[in-house]
Amino acid sequence: MALVKALETQSGAMRLLLYLLKGPSYVTLILKETDIPNIQLLRSIELLLDLKLIQKKVDTTTYPKRNIISLTNKGKQIAQKVKEIELLLKEP
């Protein structure tokens, strides 16, 4: 229940999990491709890192350096369940 409560408190966290099901992404690309506002995205990343649902790596091959965000195994499992719920809710 604590996980659900934590995810409820941060708008954008569920959308970020669903977005990352497509694969790892840069923060700037996530901002461009989603409707998650900047501050909400940063707070969602912080929360999901704390919950160990995502991981952050620094791409040092680019300038400036970029943060690559990806799902952990646990994060992927949870995101898939959220997607299943979303699909069930869309059924007539």
Image: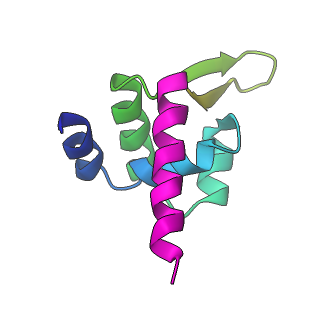
Query: Where 80 falls versus 15 (above or below)?
Result: above
Residue 37 seen from this side: no
Q: Main secondary structure of the magenta part?
A: helix
Name, please, the residue furthest toward the front: 92
Query: Which residue: 34% across, 26% down?
Result: 51
43 with respect to 21 (left or right): left
Q: Position of residue 87 (x, y in %)?
A: 54, 65
72 with respect to 63 (left or right): left
- Answer with the quarter of the image where residue 43 lies: top left
Q: Position of residue 31 (x, y in %)?
A: 59, 53
Q: Residue 64 in magenta?
A: no
Name, please, the residue furthest toward the bottom: 92
- Answer with the quarter of the image where residue 3 lies: top left
44 with respect to 4 (left or right): right
Q: Nearer the viewer, residue 26 or 15?
A: 15
Q: Nearer the viewer, residue 56 or 51?
A: 51
Q: Nearer the viewer, residue 59 or 10?
A: 10
Q: Quadrant of the N terminus?
A: top left
Query: Where 91 falls versus 13 (above or below)?
Result: below
Residue 18 seen from this side: yes
Query: Which residue: 30% across, 45% down?
Result: 7
Name, please, the residue furthest toward the top: 60
Query: Which residue: 70% across, 38% down?
Result: 23
**Which portion, as a residue range, is magenta?**
73-92
Q: Position of residue 39 (x, y in %)?
A: 39, 49
Query: Which residue: 43% across, 51% down?
Result: 14
Q: Residue 76 in magenta?
A: yes
Q: Tell me which colouring the rendered structure shows.
A: rainbow
Query: Where 84 falls versus 44 (above or below)?
Result: below
